[in-house]
Image: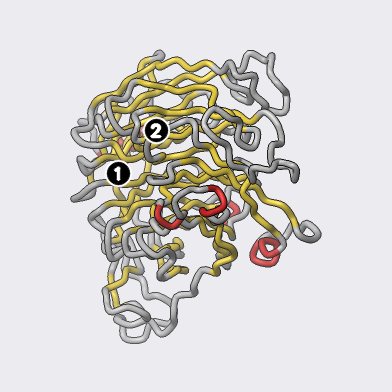
Amino acid sequence: HPILRTKPHAHHNAQRPFLCGDAMAMTPGENDGLKPTYSVPPLTSLCVLSPPSSEKIGRPAASSSPVWQCSWSRDGCVLASCHGAPDSCVRVWKKEWTGNNSDHGGEQEAMRQRWFLAATLRDGHARTVRSVAFAPCSKVLASASFDGTVAVWEKFDDGDSDDNNDGGYGGVGETAGGWECTAQLEGHESEVKCVSWNSTGSLLASCGRDKSVWIWESFLPGTIGDAGDRDPDGGGDGEGEFECIAVLHGHTGDVKCVEFAPSLGQWGDGDEILLSSSYDDTVKCWAEDGGDWYCAATLSAHSSTVWSVAAAAGGTRLVTGSSDRCLAIWRCYTAQEKRRMDPDSKGGDGLWKCVGKLPSAHDGPIYSVHCAPSRAGHGRIASGGADDRIQIYREVPGGTSDAPLFTLDAEADDAHDGDVNCVQWHPKDGSILVSCGDDGLVKIWSYNVS
């Protein structure tokens, strides 16, 4: 695979990557081809989200429970985080404005925001909550747990009002901040590692330690499966239904991550494909044909566990992050392009090809990658990992879709006191990101979009 060139980083002794692809372009400001003459701009920390004092509610200290994943609502006004033992739960955070609203985005707008804890959801799982994901409707979310189940939560009212005297904390069997667990999906034989909705909310995917991927059809408010007899604002009636439509086997190790992406008319006859990454060092592309799901491709470019896979806006590019410390860039080729490259190729599906790698993108395993929304500009990737660092790579001119070039555009050293478990771009504002880590904190960052 094409690889990027490495050169000493301005702040670290380790070799830091800057460019990826076949072409070897000079970075602006480079003098001797070895050392950059500029420093990488830092990300700006805007706020840290932490729950109320643990003594107040008789719970373990938040810092003793890692935060495994964060998920934005589609409008970016609500944020969910999931937490591990000993204080396993899902927390829902809500944004309010402290001044006049602004359409300009960025740090100034973010400074006029205040995030508060709207709800804490504890009655859905018995063990660590490993993954959380908002449906397209911001009043529905799913969570996955080491107890082997997936829980679906629906919001019924505005339980975050000032007279909510439990501070957003609900006990077992209680509604927490207006949220209620309305479905528990069982089937995995052991720990569930990740959940992900498709673009319409009609499908929910889960994966786990049992090496399987499950696809559930949902009939919930705000989805194409909604029967239409629900609250038009997206509230639930407690009678959500789910049906397992596929159990996919093919990985030979834990499945760490699942994500839907557009099929672009190149994979089966469905509108979307499902991507899964695994402890077996591969990513699999699952496609639908006549209602049946099948493995359309296996992507191999890493030498160790693939923790995370992310699709770029438009779906023609993927990025994967691995324990081998590398980021891999993948391009989707059409079936016609595939036949031109290999006349002997069979089947009518497209082709995923690794068109570049960023070796040593981090100084340890890469646990999370996410591609920026189009509003952040073309070709920006955020990553976080075991080196306690968040990095943003930006695609630079001089490359092609077959051999892209990237530069390290911004970073946050010591972003968390421990592993960075997840990093996610704001869905509407390309200058805002959120991260979470082993230190039990959720942090919101500002990125200067140049």
Q: What is the distance, in whole Å, between disc 1 and disc 2 at their CAs?
A: 41 Å
Q: What residue is shown at x 31% (from left), y 86% (from top)?
A: 32
Q: Which residue is mark 1?
A: 353
Query: Which of 388/431 is in front?
Result: 388
Residue type marked 2: Ala
On the question of residue 339 being in view, the answer is no
Q: Which residue is mark 2?
A: 126
* Residue positioned most to the right: 100
Residue 317 drawn at (x, y percent): 41, 45
Which residue does the image show at 54% across and 57% down from the upper left?
433
Percent across and percent down for residue 379 are 47, 56
Q: Residue at x 59, y 28 (%)?
A: 154
Q: Is residue 356 left or right of residue 44?
A: left
Q: Considering only vertical position in the picture, is 299 above or below 38?
A: above
**Res 129 quadrant in image:** top left
Element marked by disc 2: loop
Q: Residues within 10 Å of mark 1 (few under 14, many from 20)?
A: some
Q: Position of residue 150 (x, y in %)?
A: 42, 28
Viewer-nearest residue: 278 or 77: 77
Q: In the figure, is residue 286 to the left or right of 45?
A: left
Quadrant housing the C terminus: bottom right
Q: Check the picture and name the quadrant holding the N terminus.
A: bottom left
Above or below — where is 230 with respect to 322?
above
Q: Quadrant of residue 387?
A: bottom left
Q: Looking at the image, is mark 1 or mark 2 earlier in the sequence?
A: 2
